[in-house]
Amino acid sequence: MTTENNGQWDVFIRVCHWLTLALIIAAWWSVEAREDFPKGSDERAMWMARHVTLGLSIWFLTLFRLGWRIFATTPVVVMPDWQRWVARLVQAGLYLVLLGMPLSMILARQFAMREASFGGLFSLPQLVNEKNVELAEWFGDLHEDVFWPALLILAGVHAAGALHHQFIMKDNLLGRMFWSKR
């Protein structure tokens, strides 16, 4: 169970936090980069494969991070109850999106009978036996049109909250997410 401390976040949680951000940016960039190449080209397929690998990386990292949180300590952050409630709601939303977005990609690929490969090292097992274009498109739309905007909104609220703590409340929240205990 998570316990509180008066210092900073566990080093693993801090690394996962910033690594998740880097992976999200890389996943976005990879899917945008594929648009520079014609459909059916090897280059476009390569960028899509990178996007899938990055998305799976986010999914695995988020699962591991949630497991780690059970045992990790968290710093005491002084804030009104309503802010604590909003922070927990946003955090829960971020976790749901970080799990749901890659899962929707996995399901879209499953129903399209396409492989979900992790950098060529291994592929997720194919659990669907028959192609279903409608479900593949539905999960693809969920991935792109629901989860992506939700991620941007939740990440924006999360960042705004962090900036509020750093510059309005002056509690060095950002410093404690990087290196400093004060």
Image (tube, helix red, strand yellow):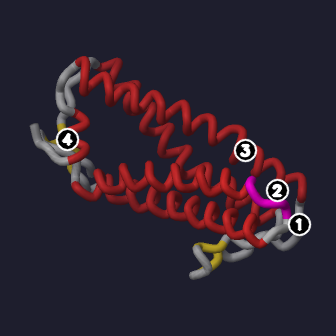
Q: Are marks 1 and 2 in contact (CB under 8 Å)?
A: yes
**What's the distance in space between the residues labelled 2 and 4, CA to CA?**
42 Å
Which residue in the protein does label 1 denote? 131
Q: Please identify the quarter of the rendering in which residue 112 is found.
A: bottom right
Badge 4 element: helix
For this view, does 123 lie left or right of residue 138? left
Quadrant occupied by the C terminus: top left
Which residue in the protein does label 4 denote? 176
Which residue in the protein does label 3 denote? 142
Q: Please identify the quarter of the rendering in which residue 56 is found.
A: bottom right
Q: Are marks 4 and 3 in contact (CB under 8 Å)?
A: no
For this view, does 145 lie left or right of residue 120? right
**What's the distance in space between the residues labelled 4 and 1, CA to CA?**
49 Å
How many residues crowd around disc 4 within 10 Å: few (fewer than 14), some, or many (20 or more)?
some
For this view, does 37 lie left or right of residue 176? right
N-term mark: 2 or 3: 2
Report the disc number at residue 136. Answer: 2
Q: Residue at x 77, y 60 (%)?
A: 37
Q: Amino acid at mark 3?
A: Leu
**What's the distance in space between the residues labelled 3 and 1, CA to CA?**
18 Å
Q: Is residue 52 above or below residue 93?
A: below
Q: Residue at x 63, y 61 (%)?
A: 51
